Amino acid sequence: MKKEIQQLVDKGEMLPLMEEFYTIQGEGYHKGTAAYFIRLGGCDVGCHWCDVKESWNADLHPPTETIKIVENAKKFSNTIVVTGGEPLMWDMTLLTKKLKAEGMM
């Protein structure tokens, strides 16, 4: 990864996006609610029960501008699920502030 891009990823201005999609939340408090999933690449935990091991290697998933991720999400739902991999490997400050500023939860 180029040094400039790595710096943007380190600051949370870009994130390794594995996939993003609109679906129905299948578990938890928002079960049955239309939701937009943001799946980030990269995992430093490696749980044996993980059903998306393809997400573990962040280098396989293109760094995507956080602003573009938010713009895509707001087209589909106010309920957002950020998942991975392990999203907390990354600085989530910018993503969560921008989602909240757009009225998404």
Image: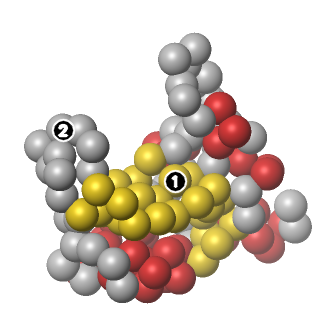
Q: Residues within 10 Å of mark 1 (few under 14, many from 20)?
A: many
Give the Cα separation between the discs numbered 2 and 1. Answer: 17 Å
Q: Please say if 34 is above or below 65.
A: above
Residue 16: x and y, percent?
65, 59
Residue 5: x and y, percent?
76, 70
Pick the quarter of the image with the C terminus: bottom left
Q: Please say if 47 is above or below 63.
A: above
Q: Quickly name the residue at label 2.
A: 28
Q: Quickly name the residue at label 1.
A: 39
> Can the viewer see residue 40 in this picture?
yes
Q: Is residue 9 left or right of residue 101?
A: right
Mark 2: amino acid:
Gly
Q: Residues within 10 Å of mark 2 (few under 14, many from 20)?
A: few
Comparing 64 with 79, the one in front is 79
Residue 27: x and y, percent?
23, 38
Mark 1: amino acid:
Arg
Instruction: Look at the numbered disc 1 and give the secondary structure of its residue.
Output: strand
Residue found at the very far left of the displayed protein: 29
Q: Residue at x 27, y 74 (%)?
A: 77
Instruction: Look at the numbered disc 2 and give the secondary structure of its residue.
Output: loop
Comparing 11 with 80, the one in front is 80
Residue 54: x and y, percent?
69, 39
Q: Is residue 33 left or right of residue 66?
A: left
Q: Residue at x 24, y 63 (%)?
A: 34
Q: Is residue 47 left or right of residue 1?
A: left
| Disc ID at residue 12 | none
